[in-house]
Amino acid sequence: MPYLNFIDLSYFYQFCFVIFKKIYYTIIKNFLLFHTIHTLAIYLAKRMKNTKIIIAESQGFCFGVRRALQIVEKKDEILILGDLIHNKKVIDILRSKGKYTVYEMPKTPQCIAITAHGNKKEVIEDLHNKGFSIIDTTCPLVQNIYRISKKLEEQGYFIVILGDKKHIEVQGIYSRLNHFIVLEDKQDIDAFDLPDKIGVICQSTFSLVKFKYLSDYIVSKGKEVKVVNTICSPTKQRQNATNKLMEQADVMIVIGGFHSSNTVKLYQLSKEKLEETYHITNKEQLKKEWFLEASTIGIVAGASTPQEDIIQAYEAIQNMIKQEV
């Protein structure tokens, strides 16, 4: 019976070892080659990556804000009743120039400004009666809502104001009316027994989509309803620009005060359709990880956001993208 002697086994083991060694080094070599190619591919992909940063067509200071600032800037010293605009940086700059923000009526009569949002009719009358020198910077577009709502009321319509009842603009509108209610959502409408004749208006910075939905719902429930869209043109432009930019962007950056009604509406509008939407007030709040996978980054800004803040955020994002490569 044939068998393998010790010498035959020795050669056999040596042969197996050589084969195993070649297989082992081939695997390692191929793995290292694959790893090198993979790393190089990632590097080249980053080098070739052409991330776009697009600023919305309509952004930054609106006409009303710019006008209010120009009026106040002409005064050497003046008090401002409430935030002239919802931007802490701008308010601090104004304070350094002798334009002080107050949130209650001062005891001593002096020169005082009404903000671009307007104010309650009775507050302005009280200031007059107490001898204050009043500088009224109420936005002409807000003043137009005063006229529209008053005319509707004179025509016999009960006024439904769609908006935030805590916002000074809305308070200014209803302070000039006798028969009104402020509603903000469908639940508010369902809880209210609508009169036969209704005139529907809204806060100037209200959501276009929400206004259409709620006003249509009121029309479906009411007997005689007249709807007047009183959303201001700058708000419409910014919301439409945001919608347009969302179609292109992977990430959206919304710049503006957290208490700015129009900025919050832009954030909500974008966030509803694009999860990667971030609301910031300044460039320091940007995070590099937001842009790691982005090919197009959109920037929108509220009506109280200085152009300087928009440019600084744009440049900061540019630098973050360069650091990725």
Image (cartoon, grey):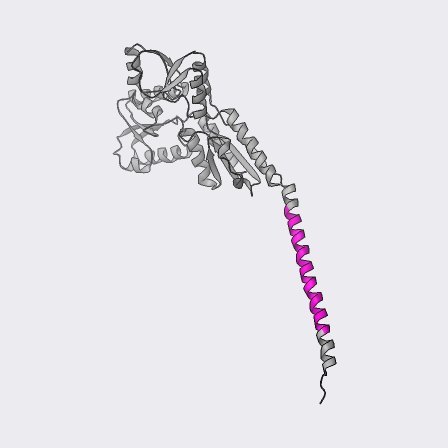
Residue at 39% across, 13% down: 78
Count of numbered labels shown in the rendering: 0
Residue in front for this viewpoint, 163 or 290: 290
| Residue 59 placement (x, y as % from top left) | 50, 27
In this rendering, does residue 19 appear at all?
yes
Residue in front for this viewpoint, 21 or 37: 21
| Residue 76 placement (x, y as % from top left) | 43, 11
Q: Residue furthest front?
A: 6
Please state, as top left, top right, bottom left or bottom right, where the C terminus lies in the image.
top right
Image position of 152 with respect to 298: above or below: above
- Give, as a single range, the part of the protein colored magenta: 14-42
Q: Based on the displayed image, in which of its 4 quarters is residue 110 positioned? A: top left
| Residue 23 placement (x, y as % from top left) | 69, 66
Please state, as top left, top right, bottom left or bottom right, where the N terminus lies in the image.
bottom right
| Residue 169 placement (x, y as % from top left) | 35, 24
Q: Based on the displayed image, in which of its 4 quarters is residue 132 positioned? A: top left
Q: Is residue 141 left or right of residue 158?
A: right
In this rendering, does residue 57 appear at all?
no
Q: Based on the displayed image, in which of its 4 quarters is residue 295 positioned? A: top right
Magenta stretch contains residue 89: no
Image position of 301 with respect to 5: above or below: above
Magenta stretch: helix, strand or loop mostly: helix
Image position of 325 with respect to 224: above or below: below
Q: Is residue 282 left or right of residue 38?
A: left
Q: Is residue 220 left or right of residue 250?
A: left
Q: Is residue 247 left or right of residue 79?
A: right
